[in-house]
Image: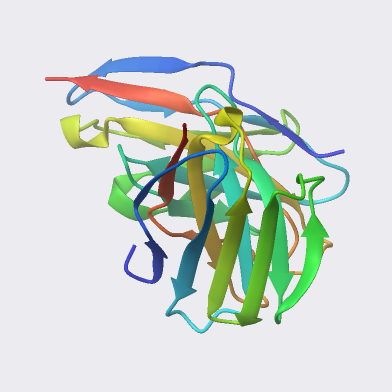
Amino acid sequence: ETGVTQTPRHLVMGMTNKKSLKCEQHLGHNAMYWYKQSAKKPLELMFVYNFKEQTENNSVPSRFSPECPNSSHLFLHLHTLQPEDSALYLCASSQDGRPEQYFGPGTRLTVT
Amino acid sequence: AQSVAQPEDQVNVAEGNPLTVKCTYSVSGNPYLFWYVQYPNRGLQFLLKYITGDNLVKGSYGFEAEFNKSQTSFHLKKPSALVSDSALYFCAVRHSGYSSASKIIFGSGTRLSIRP
């Protein structure tokens, strides 16, 4: 898991707060992903970046705003979230030519 | 459309016994298939994948999976279960024709519980 790191590991925020999640991959991969994992629901893909370009936005509300400054770093900026946004947010990366993705440990987000 | 089904929410096995976690998939064309494991408070960890070739693929921690094209299945197996194998297991599928940054569709997960 040290190949993909995520900070913070836990975050509690109010609905009016603004916060950011950070993901960094040390694997030399070119694609990065944000997923949302909620209890008793399948893993939901949120965003895909390939070579810093966003290639997929899976109908995610605008209160989630991704940023990918380079192939190693991915951010998820959060503002005016709702309690139903509480979940585990997972970052993943993959290498061109190899289909498997490697995941970070996740950020456990609680919106109060 | 791609989809993955894991018909069992939970599988209970005694330590030392063989285990099977079931997965069926639906995808047009040739599939890429994966198994991931998630331990409590951790991210998903890649176990194994099927791309092409031998239908039986071997992965980490003694796990293996068998690709069956006629039954569109990719069941995860291990000959002798360990208590430490207790975790949440996810099957996933992707169309082989997309770019490497294409999305993977995950199943809903199966909780594997190994009793001593």
Q: Give the residue displayed 53% in from the left and 25% down from the top.
A: B22
- Depicted B42 relative to depicted B82: above or below: below
Q: Foreground: A62 or B36?
A: A62
Identify the image quadrant of residue B97: bottom right
Q: Give the residue displayed 40% in from the left and 24% down from the top.
A: B111
Q: Is residue A56 visible?
A: yes
Position of residue A31 in the picture relative to residue B86 (left or right)? right
Q: Give the residue displayed 42% in from the left and 59% down from the top.
A: A104
- Depicted A14 relative to depicted B111: above or below: below
How many labels, in total? 0
Residue B14 pos. (x, y %): 21, 17
Image quadrant occupied by the C terminus of chain B: top left
Q: Foreground: B64 or A55?
A: A55
- Depicted B3 relative to depicted A62: above or below: above
Position of residue B32 in the picture relative to residue A85 (left or right)? right
Residue A66 pos. (x, y %): 67, 63
Position of residue B110 in the picture relative to residue A80 (left or right)? left
Residue occupying the far left of the picture:
B116
Residue B51 pos. (x, y %): 65, 58
Image quadrant occupied by the N terminus of chain B: top right
Residue A82 pos. (x, y %): 61, 33
Q: Give the residue displayed 50% in from the left and 25% down from the top.
A: A39
Identify the image quadrant of residue B5: top right
Residue occupying the far front of the picture:
A16
Q: Is residue B54 visible?
A: no
